[in-house]
Image: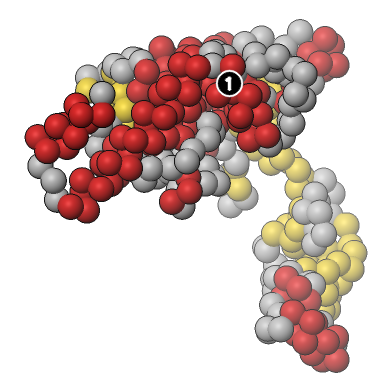
Amino acid sequence: MGYPYNTLIAPAILWENPRVTREEFAELLDRTHSSNTREYKEEEDWDFYNPRIEDSNYHDGIEGVAYFLCLGNTEEYLDFVHGATSDENGLTILPPYWRPLDDEKTEESGYRYELVRHIGNEFDPVSRSKELSWDKLKVGSLWEETMMGAEKGVVTKIYSGGPIEIDVEEKELLEKLYGEPVDDVVMGPQYEYDMDIRPVFPKVEIKGFKTMEDLWEECPLYNPANSFDWTKSNGHFRSGFFGGDNFLWEKKGEKYSLDKRTFDLIPSSIREGSLGFTDLILTRGALRHNAWKMLSYKALQHFPQFLNDFPDVRAEYDKAIWDSQNAADAKEKKMTTSELMRKRMLRD
């Protein structure tokens, strides 16, 4: 009738800790430990965890909060990271991007991150060659190397070339294999040219940073506080593989809580097709006892021992089963709130 799930960690935290700021929420998420890949052994303690294989989103600060609240990016941020421009020759100038450095490069440079700005394009002398192309070319076209896309050049003269004759038998064989018509991507480059190309290379400016905070000071839109749409006042949590879009959150002022409408929408448990009330109860119990083994891969094998070792969780679980079943029964029979409360009082 229910099991703990790591995908319910975020709603369980907000249920147990209502009205927290995004920073407080991030800190609470960071205190948890879970894994979708690690199968824990029976002899390992409940609070044992391996930090190398943890689910990283729980430890990503407010960016992790945005992930679990399913917040989208702001238009300003999207324009910034996707806003390519052109130089005086009509060639693309890509937007800036950042990248982490590995330990060896960090030790060598003293920086952990790099910001790469594409500030222009440089040319090599014109050379003549025969090349394949995905696209039909003309003088002034930008040719790109067909397989890896590493080489680019501006076409300055075409001596000969054009469409490549398609191997009809090969195409028919591929269509029979795929069971549908194949496109140009499957068939490969469609053109071949003998031409003069003026190779073009991006001119970049690279700046190193010791911390992400330093990088954010240089480019504020990379800061999760600015890149995500924090104006949303309600929504649903990221559901994961087993569903759970009916788990809702709300924000009042700058404080987040589990939306009480959740309890009218969720089923009794995962056995009804998606994550439900008893699953939430058990996840909250696992968090309370730091039972990270129950929030890991193939954790259900430890479930009987989990209930045995934590009697308070068992009591909550038994009550949750009774409550959820009777709530469903009350809805079906259209009982009033008073009638349901009297039924609960008789049980207690």
Q: Is residue 71 left or right of residue 153?
A: left
Q: Amino acid at mark 1?
A: Asn
Q: Is residue 239 visible?
A: no
- Residue 81 in the image: state x and y as whole percent: 52, 37
Image quadrant in which you'd find residue 255: top left
Which residue: 30% across, 23% down?
A: 257
- Residue 288 in the image: state x and y as whole percent: 49, 14
Q: Is residue 255 left or right of residue 168?
A: left
- Residue 9 in the image: state x and y as whole percent: 49, 27
| Whether residue 215 is situated above or below residue 233 in the rendered picture | above
- Residue 160 in the image: state x and y as whole percent: 83, 78
Which residue: 76% across, 43% down?
A: 201
Which residue: 83% across, 69% down?
A: 132
Q: Which residue is mark 1?
A: 308
Q: Is residue 110 left or right of residue 234?
A: right
In depth, the one of 16 and 329 nearer the eye is 329
Which residue: 83% across, 73% down?
A: 193
| Whether residue 325 is situated above or below residue 147 in the rendered picture | above
Q: Is residue 136 visible?
A: yes
What kind of element bears circle 1? helix
Image quadrant in which you'd find residue 66: top left
In depth, the one of 174 and 130 nearer the eye is 174
